[in-house]
Image: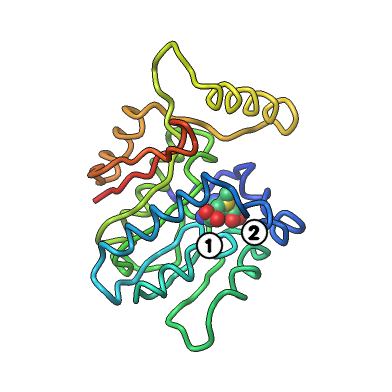
Amino acid sequence: MANTLKPMPVNTKYFGARASEYDDTRKHNSVAIEDDLAIAAFLALLPPSSIIADVPCGTGRAVAAVLAAGHRYRGADISEDMLAECRQKLPYGADATLTQADARKLPWADGECDHLLSIKFLKWLPTDEIVLEVLMEYRRVCQGKALVNVKLARERADYSLRELKDRCSKIIDRLKFGFSVRSMPFKTFETQCKRAGWTIVSATENTASHGIVHNLILD
Ligand SMILES: C[S@@+](CC[C@H](N)C(=O)[O-])C[C@H]1O[C@@H](n2cnc3c(N)ncnc32)[C@H](O)[C@@H]1O
């Protein structure tokens, strides 16, 4: 399945100015700050010197946290421009590598990484089948746990203002660019996890996102 890598709009989104300005767009973002806390809490659970895959690593938001927790860092991203920003965050001599790769075909051997981070990515995948492909590739390279950040759709009639705003911006993005992020029903995501060999062991809502973003630990 992973050999037929269909192009996805998100593959081409994070280049040029989007990459160089990416960190600035994040500053003071309450959802990002809470996700960073979830990343640090996850890393603190793991045995020291674990090899942590960060897919996609983007501009390297997790680099400092991974190294500060005493782990080894392995980042992969499809965008050379995001990787160039990330490279500047790698301290000299740190046990950290970066590789340009598609998340559906990662550059590591089976079980080469101990644990894995996937932040702000699965929501960009256009179909449930591609979510499955990515989760299977994560499972192939990672022996242990994964922290995955997803947008989950709740099946209910009442929506918070934040959720309504989120729905409107998705519609606008679809009209403007032809694609947008997706929120998956929890059950659908859980099914894809099971098919890929993962079990969801914990699910934490990002409260700043008002019920939209969730950080899930898979094992
Ligand atoms: C919203 S950013 C998130 C980056 C990082 N995880 C973070 O939280 O800052 C999405 C990233 O996905 C990368 N990307 C897009 N398509 C990809 C693919 N097929 N495989 C790997 N990375 C991809 C983009 O280049 C971009 O860096």
Residue type at mark 1: give it. Arg
Task: In the rendered structure, find residue 2 and report the number of the disc placed on it.
Answer: none
Q: Is residue 179 left or right of residue 112?
A: right
Relative depth, front residue between 80 and 109: 80
Outermost residue toward the bottom in this view: 93
Q: Position of residue 47 (x, y in %)?
A: 23, 70
Tell me which residue sits at (50%, 21%) in the image. Answer: 160
Q: Position of residue 83 (x, y in %)?
A: 61, 67
Residue 112 percent coordinates (x, y): 32, 69
User: Extreme top residue here?
Assistant: 157
Mark 1 lies within 8 Å of ligand 1 (Cβ measured): yes
Vertical relation: 211 (above or below) 138: above
Q: Residue at x 45, y 13 (%)?
A: 158
Name the image quarter holding residue 216: top left
* Disc 2 residue: CB within 8 Å of ligand 1: no
What's the amino acid at mark 2? Asp
Are discs 1 and 2 less than 8 Å apart at CB? yes
Camera-nearest residue between 79 and 25: 25
